[in-house]
């Protein structure tokens, strides 16, 4: 059967993609960001996921104000990198996993999570920057990807509790899929940042540090945090962090924290990154 | 009719809720059109003419022409949509963010390098703020 072996969280700042694409990754400013992912690249080369369920938000690219799905799952065979106003990123086309994606859609809808099914979608930096951070600049992405979009553009996004429970339902769906697949789930966005208005530039290291601790060790409590706390303390765009809870809900109650990275700034944003593994039965490593 | 909206009290912050989205529909959809290279070219060739093709208010159009992002947000713009305008101008998110705070590019970039704007609510709180919010009109 398919199983979820690990979760990854990472910020998805567009300037990170631009730095990579324009050959500026070795500049001191950006090197400090990318060095936090050196371990992660080695880790994922060894972990070799078949499929990544990539929870992200679209930034007014595939979804305008015409249709705003709260949760949308990409069931297409492939997804093209989007032109976000400065031309598409020069990264590989994202190969989907339509059979598994359709199975997840059917399974979680039957569990009362009303997903929107998307059969055509261009994917923006929210999805491609995390792939670049973990996989670098390959000719083709080394695994298939199920884009899972969460609305965090028009308020209110789904609650933390809803995201967490959806993650749990996604896990049950994956584990009821007959094919033997190594599946990871990634939660992207955050951490604290505000891109708009006179308060732009807000960063809250204390909030972020606590969040990193809580999502590892106390996710049930964290899932109950109200949106107002995110908006006030982590900035208006810090609310993206609810997407990390989808990832966390899909993992075991107790997980091993394999890697943690936190850095300020990448452009306007605090970069946070975690790798969490489900502990295999009989494995006594800490 | 109005539900409880405590997020409206957060200083220097406009939360893009359903009411803002309704007011800003045409403005944001104009921005969305700039995802197409051909539209970007038409807009750059004659901004006013291009804006007149959209059912935007005159205030919204003037705010776009003036690149007054705080004003666009007040009139229903959302930053991820407005980003298409500064992308068309070849500008970055950090450029736009600095503009909205009323700080110079250099001062804003320095604030970010030093850890960003301190949280803690009070606008212009000199003691706790690494980068103070402008107290009066934000931009221009």
Image (cartoon, rainbow, N blue to C red):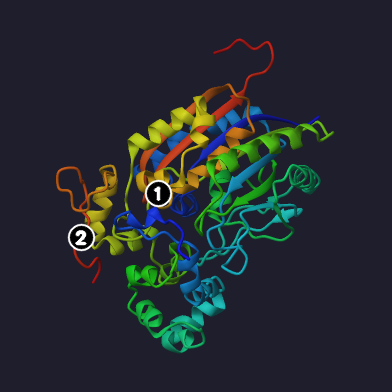
Query: Mark 2 near mark 1, Cβ–Cβ under 8 Å?
Result: no
User: Could you say whether the residue bearing mark 2 is in a helix, strand or loop?
Assistant: loop
Q: CA distance from mark 2 to mark 1?
A: 20 Å
Horizontally, residue A158 falls left or right of residue B117, namely: right
Residue at 45 percent of width and 67 percent of height: B20
Q: Position of residue A266 (x, y in %)?
A: 38, 46
Task: Give me the chain letter of mark 1.
Answer: A
The residue carrying pointer 1 sits among few (fewer than 14), some (14 to 19) or many (20 or more) residues within 10 Å by Cα, namely many
Q: Position of residue A158 (x, y in %)?
A: 56, 49
**Relative to residue A149, is residue A86 depicted above or below?**
below
Q: Nearer the viewer, residue A24 or A62?
A: A62
Q: Nearer the viewer, residue A24 or B98?
A: B98
Residue A134: in sight, yes or no?
A: no
**Relative to residue B57, is residue A121 depicted above or below?**
above
Residue under label 2: B134
Residue at the limit of the structure toward the right, as seen here: A178
Q: Position of residue A207 (x, y in %)?
A: 37, 37
Horizontally, residue B68 falls left or right of residue A224, namely: left
User: Could you say whether the residue bearing mark 1 is in a helix, strand or loop?
Assistant: helix
Task: Give me the chain letter of mark 2.
Answer: B
Residue under label 1: A231
């Amino acid at each position: 059967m398919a199983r979820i072996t690990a979760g990854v969280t990472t910020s998805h700042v567009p300037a990170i993609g631009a730095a990579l694409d324009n050959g500026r990754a070795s500049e001191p400013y950006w090197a400090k960001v990318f060095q936090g992912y050196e371990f992660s690249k080695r880790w994922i080369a060894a972990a070799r996921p078949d499929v990544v369920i990539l929870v992200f938000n679209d930034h007014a690219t595939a979804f305008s104000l015409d249709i705003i799905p709260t949760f949308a799952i990409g069931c297409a065979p492939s997804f093209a990198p989007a032109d976000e106003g400065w031309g598409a990123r020069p990264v590989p086309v994202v190969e989907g996993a339509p059979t598994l994606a359709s199975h997840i859609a059917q399974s979680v809808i039957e569990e009362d999570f009303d997903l929107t099914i998307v059969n055509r979608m261009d994917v923006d930096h929210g999805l491609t920057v995390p792939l670049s951070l973990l996989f670098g600049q390959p000719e083709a992405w080394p695994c298939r990807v199920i884009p899972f979009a969460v609305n965090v553009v028009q308020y209110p996004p789904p609650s933390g509790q809803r995201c967490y429970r959806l993650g749990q339902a996604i896990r049950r769906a994956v584990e009821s899929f007959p094919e033997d697949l190594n599946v990871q789930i990634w939660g992207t966005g955050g951490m604290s940042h505000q891109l708009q208005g006179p308060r732009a530039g807000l960063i809250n290291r204390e909030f972020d540090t606590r969040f990193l601790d809580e999502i590892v060790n106390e996710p049930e409590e964290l899932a109950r945090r109200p949106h107002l706390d995110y908006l006030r303390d982590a900035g208006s765009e810090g609310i993206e962090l609810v997407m990390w809870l989808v990832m966390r809900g899909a993992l075991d109650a107790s997980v091993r924290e394999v890697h943690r990275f936190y850095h300020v700034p990448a452009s306007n944003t605090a970069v946070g990154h975690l790798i969490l593994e489900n502990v295999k039965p009989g494995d006594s490593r800490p | 009719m109005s539900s409880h909206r405590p997020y409206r009290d957060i200083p220097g912050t406009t939360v893009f809720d359903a009411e803002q989205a309704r007011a800003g529909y045409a403005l944001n959809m104009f921005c969305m059109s700039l995802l197409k290279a051909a539209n970007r070219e038409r807009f750059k060739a004659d901004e006013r003419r291009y804006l007149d093709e959209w059912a935007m208010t005159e205030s919204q159009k003037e705010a776009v022409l003036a690149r007054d992002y705080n004003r666009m947000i007040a009139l229903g713009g959302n930053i991820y949509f407005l980003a298409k305008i500064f992308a068309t101008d070849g500008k970055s998110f950090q450029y736009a963010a600095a503009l909205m705070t009323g700080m110079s590019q250099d001062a804003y970039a320095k604030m970010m390098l030093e850890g960003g704007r301190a949280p803690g609510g009070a606008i212009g709180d000199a003691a706790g703020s690494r980068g103070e919010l402008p107290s009066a009109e934000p931009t221009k």
